[in-house]
Amino acid sequence: MTEGRSSQRGALRSVLASHDFRRLYSTRLAGQFGDGLLQSALATFVLFSPERQPDAVRVAAVFAILLLPYSIIGPFAGVLLDRWRRRNVLVRANLLKALLTIPVIVVVGTGQADLVLGFFVLLVLAVGRFILAGLSASLPHVVSGRELITGNALAPTSGTIAVGVGAVLGVGIRALAGGGDTGSQVVLISALVSYVVASIIATRLAVNALGPDRDAPVDTFARVVHGLVLGARTLRDRVPARDIMVTIIANRFVFGVLTAGALLLVRGSFNTTTQADAALGDFAFATTGAAAGAFLGAVVTPAMTRRIGIGRWVSIVLVQGGVIGFGLLTATALEPNLITLIAGATSIGLTGQSVKVCADTVLQREIPDDRLGRVFALFDMIVNVSLVAGITLTAFASPPSGQFTWGYLMCAALLVLTAAWYVRRRTSY
């Protein structure tokens, strides 16, 4: 154990010793910190502003804008990244994000949360997804061998943390700037500065440092589409992989219901229209509960699957998410209480991450390596589309108070029935 930890520390030191890795890593952190600020400003301006009580269209649109670019653009980003110098992509795309943030700042200044705002935010996030793909494609050019595994573990995880830190600090910056639309503008200006910093850091890399290698095969958009179709056919033919995907679709759909339901509850039941900042704080607590549950799921799932198997563990966590998680959410709808909301979010977060870890493992075991990338690209799209579908349904079907009792009970039934179906399917192979 001690020897293993020493080896991990040595690999980490080796990765961080690379000047180019540190520059690429810093570019990621600065850019994703800016993304957190941007998302925080958008959420506070549109969903947690005393002047704008969120309606169904607004809730659905905000989450669709935040989530869909990550799934739709991702598979196609590699086509251009294999043609253009990736160092130049990182420099220019971060500057483009900064420029596209300017009209967002202007629109927020008018106080209008309309389609123009959504369009420019969507553009910023789409360019951001392109940058993230470029960062991942560039990594093998700055680290290699066993250090690549360490780099792959360190960089994306740190980037996710940077987004979270940016979002939390964005709330604080907005409050210090006096709140309201002016505070949201200050947060957006901070995001713009972060994108410029990311671009400047990227200029410190040599033009050819990140590839692409000119002797590597160049993909096309048509080949990407063909690859996604091939991934779908592979999933259809590999029964265990297809079945675990059904559990993921059900799970991400109900997590979308939780996300929108929690938002509406804290805005419409826990607080008055004028208590937007208090509602934002309550939503942050609920989000923290879901994150804590996800962390617990990531910790316990490997041990539990070794002990009782993937099939039984997936079924157990689905049932607990339905009975405990959505049971608590239903209780919250009947009698609004922040503690029960947090506890329900924790339970559903545990289910979500447990199923995700098991799904990743099943796909890696069942899908041939030469098709695994295509399947995971399709997997990413399905996960986010399912999540947005749950959010959209709740936004339109739930009352503004978030007391969506029948919807939460249907989600509980969906998870329990999915668990029963999955157990039965697993016994057939």
Image (cartoon, rainbow, N blue to C red):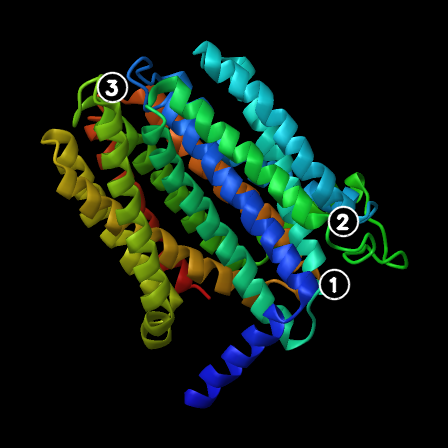
Q: Are marks 2 and 1 in contact (CB under 8 Å)?
A: yes
Residue topped by disc 3: 399
Residue under label 2, please give it: 86
Q: Earlier in the sequence, mark 1 or mark 3?
A: 1
Disc 1 residue type?
His
Residue 51, image x, y percentages: 31, 13
User: What whole-number distance in Å separates the C-alpha atoms at marks 2 and 3?
Assistant: 47 Å
SS label for mark 1: helix
| Residue plotted at (42% across, 88% down) | 2
The residue that mark 1 highlights is 141
Question: Vertical placement of 369 versus 281: above or below?
Answer: below
- The quadrant of the rendering that contains the N terminus is bottom left
Callout 2 touching callout 3 (CB < 8 Å) = no
Camera-near label (2 vs 3) is: 2
Judge left or right: residue 48 versus residue 203. left
Image quadrant in which you'd find residue 147: bottom right
x and y percent of residue 271 in the render?
17, 24
Distance from label 2 to label 1 (Cα)?
Answer: 11 Å
**Number of marks present in the image shown:** 3
Structural distance between the alpha carbons of marks 1 and 3: 52 Å
Q: Position of residue 77 (x, y in %)?
A: 70, 42
Q: Name the amino acid, label 2.
A: Arg
* Horizontal side, residue 189 vs residue 48: left or right: right
| Amino acid type at mark 3 | Pro
Task: Give the residue displayed 56% in from the left and 39% down from the top.
Answer: 194
Return the residue found at the far right: 215
Camera-nearest residue between 148 and 63? 148
